[in-house]
Image: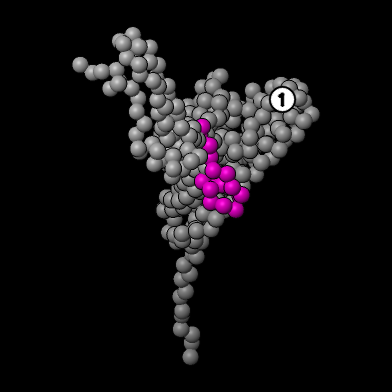
């Protein structure tokens, strides 16, 4: 049977070596009461046990930083500064795309999909894809509409890619900048008005353009009634995302200012859709070829004269 002396804490040589190597290391002292030993007739004392916890504290600091979700900070000229804007996975992007094509009343796109982590990855690639889909589909539409014209010779119109890129990227950046600046100014005038950050505003505008990618592909079909129907459907879906997102912010403003802000958002969005349709998907009008005038045949009879 173990004696009371065997149950006492003892100081090991390893702890002494650790303290000699790092005198400032954090230690933990434990004192063992000898009441039980005295009850058993023994006279054991108490010993101190010292443990090195410096490594544990460092690990706790690292884990707290990870759990806190702290992002590396740096100047705008550093790569780390822009890396956080693209910190999004495929599941989040697909979820935001689904939310942009299925807007629901009462569901704010920023609060339900973007607020936790606004990104530029999805808006950037949506704009790039839309540029090429509009330019390529416009070329194919022109080729199909003039395929029966013998005087038409197909030439790839690469300048349409440049025009589409300028229009789409200017809309996806300049309009959010103007709207964000206007809402920031109204926040200073009307204290009760809320607002979104610049990154959130750009993000919602970028995702709202996704519906135009499949729409531009369907514009290849050479039926004007179908093209205009697709434009109306795309404008309603995409415009609903913007209205449902920004109306809760501007409705606290004056009635005239709130209605004017929402109307401006819808009008600019409508001009983008109609402008792309009118320029890239023009309907070819085949003018009837006039028939060549027929010259009546002239019959001449020559009679020999008298000699």
> 192 or 26: which is nearer to us?
26
Q: Residue at x 60, y 38 (%)?
A: 199
- Quadrant where the N terminus lies? top left
| Residue 127 as seen in the image, left or right of residue 187 | left
Color style of the picture: one colour
Instruction: Answer yes or no: is residue 138 visible.
Output: no
The stretch drawn in magenta includes residue 74: yes
The stretch drawn in magenta includes residue 265: no
The part of the chain drawn in magenta is 68-83
Q: Position of residue 234 (x, y in %)?
A: 51, 33
Q: Position of residue 37 (x, y in %)?
A: 33, 14
| Residue 32 as seen in the image, left or right of residue 211 | left
Crowding at mark 1 (Cα within 10 Å: few <14, some 14-19, many 20+): some
Q: Does residue 131 sit above or below 56 in this rendering? A: below
Q: Residue at x 38, y 15 (%)?
A: 34
| Residue 259 as seen in the image, left or right of residue 71 | right
Q: Position of residue 137 (x, y in %)?
A: 45, 48
Q: Secondary structure at mark 1?
A: loop
Q: Residue at x 50, y 65 (%)?
A: 295
Could you say which quadrant of the image residue 245 lies in? top right
Residue farthest along the bottom direction in this orientation: 307
Residue farthest along the left direction in this orientation: 1
Q: Does residue 32 sit above or below 202 in this rendering? A: above
> 278 or 14: which is nearer to us?
14
Residue farthest along the top direction in this orientation: 39
Instruction: Answer yes or no: is residue 257 visible.
Output: yes
Residue designated by label 1: 193
Q: Main secondary structure of the magenta part?
A: loop
């Amino acid at each position: 049977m173990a004696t009371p002396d065997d149950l006492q804490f003892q100081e090991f040589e390893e702890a002494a070596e650790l303290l000699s190597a790092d005198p400032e290391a954090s230690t933990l002292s434990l004192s063992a009461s000898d009441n039980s030993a005295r009850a058993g007739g023994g006279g054991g004392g108490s010993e101190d046990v010292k443990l090195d916890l410096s490594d544990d504290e460092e690990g706790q600091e690292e884990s707290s930083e990870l759990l806190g979700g702290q992002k590396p900070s740096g100047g705008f000229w550093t790569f780390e500064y822009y890396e956080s804007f693209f910190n999004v996975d495929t599941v989040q992007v697909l979820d935001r795309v689904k939310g942009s094509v299925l807007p629901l009343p009462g569901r704010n796109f920023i609060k339900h999909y973007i607020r936790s982590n606004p990104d530029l990855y999805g808006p950037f690639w949506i704009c790039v894809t839309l540029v090429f889909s509009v330019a390529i589909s416009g070329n194919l539409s022109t080729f199909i509409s003039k395929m029966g014209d013998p005087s038409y010779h197909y030439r790839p119109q690469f300048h349409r890619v440049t025009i589409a890129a300028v229009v789409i990227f200017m809309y996806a950046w300049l309009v959010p900048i103007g709207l964000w600046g206007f809402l920031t100014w109204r926040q200073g005038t009307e204290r009760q008005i809320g607002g979104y950050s610049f990154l959130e505003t750009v993000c919602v505008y970028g995702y709202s353009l996704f519906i135009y990618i499949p729409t531009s592909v369907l514009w290849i079909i050479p039926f004007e009634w179908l093209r205009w129907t697709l434009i109306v459907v795309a404008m309603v879906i995409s415009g609903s995302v913007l209205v449902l997102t920004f109306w809760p912010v501007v409705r606290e403003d004056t009635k005239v200012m709130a209605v004017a802000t929402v109307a401006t958002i819808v009008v600019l969005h409508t001009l983008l859709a109609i402008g792309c349709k009118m320029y890239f998907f023009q309907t070819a009008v085949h003018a009837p070829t006039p028939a060549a005038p027929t010259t009546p045949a002239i019959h001449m009879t020559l009679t020999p004269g008298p000699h």
